[in-house]
Amino acid sequence: AGLNGHLFHVLVRDGEVRDAVLAGMRSIDVVATFHYVPLHLSPMGRRFGYAPGDLPVTERQAARLIRLPLHNGMSDVDQERAIEVFRHVLDRVDPGP
């Protein structure tokens, strides 16, 4: 069985950390993004009557998700740099216990 290598994601503590990490990475010229907008909060989900708070676990997980840069043209050096920048920024933003 092969791996599905179209994206690589990590979960951080919360949305505040996610936003700070994304901004910090961007300031060092490594662009990561959030990836998942819960479907119940999309325009179609709203038309079906869903609202913020209806699926709190989904919303909490979505707020924590960061999609790291990954594409088939990335060199090993680019990959290592993206990982190192992510680690550096995360350690600065959310040093943990």
Image (cartoon, rainbow, N blue to C red):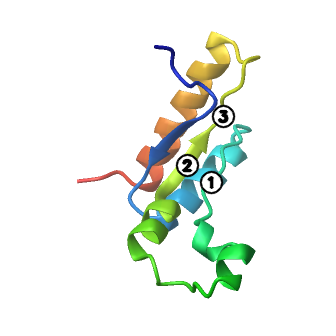
Tag 2 residue: 66
- Residue at 51% from the left image edge and 61% from the top image edge: 62
| Label 2, label 1: how far apart the Cα atoms are | 5 Å
At label 3, counting other C-alpha atoms closer than 10 Å, the crowd grade (few under 14, some 14-19, many 20 or more) is: some
Q: Residue 87: horizontal and vertical position, in percent?
A: 47, 37
| Label 1, label 3: how far apart the Cα atoms are | 11 Å
Q: Which type of secondary structure does the marked residue at label 1 adopt?
A: loop
Q: Which type of secondary structure does the marked residue at label 3 adopt?
A: loop
Does 89 appear above or below 42? above
Tag 1 residue: 34
Does 50 appear above or below 81? below
Q: Which type of secondary structure does the marked residue at label 2 adopt?
A: strand
- Residue at 41% from the left image edge and 45% from the top image edge: 91
The numbered mark, 2 or 1, whose residue comes first in the sequence reads 1
| Residue type at tag 2 | Ile
| Label 2, label 3: how far apart the Cα atoms are | 10 Å
Side of 17 relative to 35 (left or right): left
| Residue type at tag 3 | Pro
Is mark 2 in CB contact (under 8 Å) with mark 1?
Answer: yes
Is mark 1 in CB contact (under 8 Å) with mark 3?
Answer: no
Does 31 appear above or below 43? above
Residue 69's tag is 3
